Amino acid sequence: MRVIRFHMVALPLFLGIVGCGSKSDSVTPVGTGGKVGTGGTIGSGGVRTDPSTGGAGVATGGRGSDTGGQGPGSGGSVGSGGAPVTGGVMVSGGNLVTGGANGSGGKLATGGVTGSGGAIGSGGAPTDASVAGGSTAGIDAGKDGATVSGGAVGSGGVAGTGGSTIIAATPPMGWNSWNNFGCNPSESLIKGTADAMVSSGMAAVGYQYVNIDDCWMSGRSSSGELQWDTAKFPGGIPALAEYVHGKGLKLGIYESPSTTTCAGKTGGAGHEAQDAQTFAKWGIDYLKYDHCRTTDMGSFARMGTALKATGRPIVYSINTVYGGGSCVVPPSCSIDATKIANLWRIEFDITNTWKSVTGLIDFDKPLAQYAGPGHWNDPDMLEVGRGMTADEDRAHFGMWAMLAAPLITGNDVTKMSATTKAILTNTDVIAVNQDPLGKQGTLISSSNSLEIWSKQLSGTNVRAVALLNRSGSAASMSVTWAQIGLASGSATVRDLYAQKDLGPSTNSYSATSVPSHGIVMLKIASAP
């Protein structure tokens, strides 16, 4: 069942179709030669004792329960009640890949993967990329030990600063069931999606969360604990979490602060602390908390506090608005989302139309000041592969990357076309989204539906540029170095969708034909 709501939108004005709100870090091997910190032990808080050794070191003061680089406990928990909060936590026991002795903890197994959830801290890129066997210029960030391009360590850390322990230090990447499957999530769907995310290569490029949306729940027990729908999830949510974790991925779930969810299922009103503990016990890694019908905005803050109290690093995504304008901080909002959640919806539910995509881009334009490591503006899930043209899909995905938006796909990843897969797994575009500096791109020029956007990237004098053509016909578009804050002279230019270096250009760059409803994405770097 899909709930229909009509929204009065100030800019632009149109009707938004609402499902369940926004309905709506994947671990790849750590580069060879990377050692696990000093001793590979797991402490409380997970501060890296020696981040220069590959970004995977964890604090001393409390060994894991097993040798061989394995994390403690079953199901990813440390002690009782779930994995410790952020930093250096090796969740649920997988072996780290290749290289290096694990201090007193034994050798690391080759060919293994980080444990279920595989968090090596909540952040941490190496201080010297060379020790990880490659450059941090690939997909850094937010993916708890993700590596790309020959050993760049992700995990949300800022390269060169010794790592970060921030939850969602870069925009979360994953998948959500709502856009394509609505009120019909199931155990088989989630398992099949997790399998496909690995086999398709999505996990390898950073997609990590497999999120169950509305309609998974079925009442509460006599003690008030949430119950899952046993017809849809016969094996239970904890067992499903274990399965997803076993794939090196993480499991997300959905609830609402109302008495019922958007689809009329069991809500969370008045059960924030109890539900947070339940989610942690089940092994949940991501919670989408959806406004629906609540009038109690304080519930968002109570749930945020309750999640932190569990001791498990759970990404917290909230939806506080339905067509009434962005609600981020007072006075336009009764709560301060930046202090409560890791990401917050900015407006109406997305649909698979160009008008919806561009409308959300417009709502996100003035919100760049609120984005940064650990807190992100969320223009809703991706509609790539769900009926728009290939040019529109590329523009949609590219602009979400420029906006530092969460990259949560909503398509059926088990049936992706080659074009959809190529868009969603483009490592150059993903690297823009996952850049550890955490800047949201801004509009620097607009004329006749032709927009130029710029996003500062980590490194010296590096910018991502989007030439966005919102018009009905192809157009020539140019960007000057002065427009993006670079000095005049020569700069190197790379076409990110073509994944091709275009060589040096002086003072400006021109794209002769940007397609209608399309985009050209560039990485421009000038000499220091």
Image (cartoon, rainbow, N blue to C red):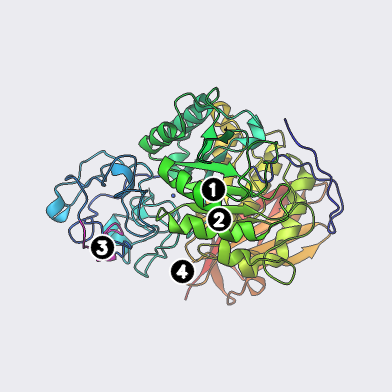
User: Percent position (x, y) of residue 348?
Assistant: 75, 50
Name the kind of residue labelled 3 in the image. Answer: Ala
- The Cα atoms of the two marked residues, 2 and 1, are separated by 10 Å
The residue to which callout 3 is attached is: 59
- Which residue corresponds to the image point at 68% horizontal and 38% vertical from the top-left? 390
Tag nearer the camera, 3 or 4: 3
- The Cα atoms of the two marked residues, 3 and 4, are separated by 28 Å
Q: Is 432 left or right of 483, judged from the image as shown?
A: left
- The Cα atoms of the two marked residues, 3 and 2, are separated by 29 Å
Q: Residues within 10 Å of mark 2 (few under 14, many from 20)?
A: many
Q: Residues within 10 Å of mark 4 (few under 14, many from 20)?
A: some
522 vs 94, nearest the viewer: 94
The residue to which callout 1 is attached is: 287
User: Percent position (x, y) of residue 421?
Assistant: 55, 35
Asked which quadrant contains residue 302, the reply is bottom right
The residue to which callout 4 is attached is: 459
Quadrant housing the N terminus: top right
- The Cα atoms of the two marked residues, 2 and 4, are separated by 37 Å
Please report whichever mark, 4 or 1, sits nearer to the chain's N-terminal start: 1
The residue to which callout 2 is attached is: 303
Asked which quadrant contains residue 485, the reply is bottom right
367 shown above or below 70: below
- Which residue corresponds to the image point at 85% horizontal and 59% vertical from the top-left? 10
Name the kind of residue labelled 4 in the image. Answer: Gly
- The Cα atoms of the two marked residues, 3 and 1, are separated by 27 Å
Residue numbers of the magenta segment:
49-62
Please report whichever mark, 3 or 4, sits nearer to the chain's N-terminal start: 3
Taking the image as drawn, is residue 431 in sight?
A: yes
